[in-house]
Image (tube, grey):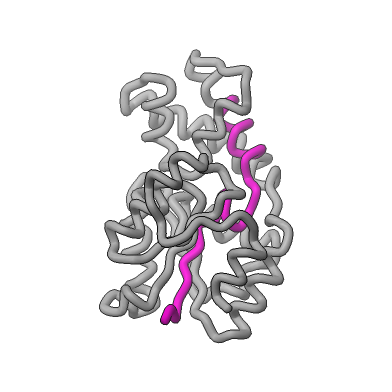
Amino acid sequence: MYKAIFFDLDGTLTESGEGITKSVQYALEKIGKPEEDLEKLKVFVGPPLMEQFMKYAGVDEATGRKAVEFYRERYEVKGIYENHPYEGVEEMLQELKRKGYILAVASSKPEYYVTQILDYFKLSSYFDVVVGSEMNGARTSKSEVIEEALKRINMSDKRNEVLMVGDKEHDVLGARAAGLDCVAVAYGYGTQEELTEANPLKIVDSVDELLHFFD
């Protein structure tokens, strides 16, 4: 019986692809690796940013770090608001809260941004804790974020009572590494293939189906 639910943010609670991909495009242009096709940049939604810049653009760590700085130049003033909650998310959170679940956000995005986004969309009040990475690049792996969230709600020794919900393979794998079950949502930015391969407890196709998982 689950008592707490950890949600990823991007691609799970909010559809944030536009702001992220346009900010990545801006950063790639700045480091001399331009990419016109925003669709290709959707791989940046979810995983730790610097790691993804290094992998995608084939650059070293110093250039990857610089790319993150350029990304933030645009994201902080514009990209963060090119974003909206998926339809039905607030109603789902209301219902889960009413049922007595402890709710948390566990995201690889910097905690500073996560808090801003939740405040902007008036979703903060539904969550007992909000955990993200540090702006200096610390705590970016999903399992580290989950460990911190477990610590903050005092459930490090009750992992079988905590469920992770996310849209990418790193959510599923991070949950598994931390000893948590994970339900994957297929409406986000992960492909059906990567989710199936990651082998979560269940894959759901909509916010409504996710809510019914807790019936």
Q: Quadrant of the C terminus?
A: bottom right
Q: Is residue 14 left or right of residue 56?
A: right
Q: How many marks are shown on the rendered structure?
A: 0
Compare residues 107 and 39 and report the one nearer the observer: 39
Relative to 134, is 130 on the left or the right? Answer: right
The residue at 57%/55% (across/down) is: 12
- The location of residue 192, given as percent across then percent down, is 51, 42
Q: Is residue 168 above or below residue 71?
A: below
Question: Residue 204, position in %: x, y?
Answer: 56, 58
Looking at this rendering, what residue extends furthest in the right direction? 87
Q: Quadrant of residue 214?
A: bottom right
Read off the magenta span.
1-25
Q: Is residue 213 above or below residue 99?
A: above
Residue 76: name its quadrant: top right
Residue 106 is left or right of residue 77, and the answer is left
Q: Is residue 182 left or right of residue 26?
A: left
Q: Is residue 151 above or below residue 7?
A: below
Q: Quadrant of the N terminus?
A: bottom left
Q: Position of residue 102 (x, y in %)?
A: 49, 79
Which of the pair 157/187 is nearer the observer? 187
Q: Nearer the viewer, residue 19 or 70?
A: 19
Q: What residue do we see at 46% from left, 28% from top?
A: 67
- The residue at the point 26 percent across, 78 percent down is 157
Q: Position of residue 36 (x, y in %)?
A: 62, 17
- 167 over 90 or under it: above or below: above
Q: Residue at x 58, y 85 (%)?
A: 99
Based on the picture, tell me whether residue 21 belongs to the magenta stretch: yes
Q: Is residue 136 magenta?
A: no
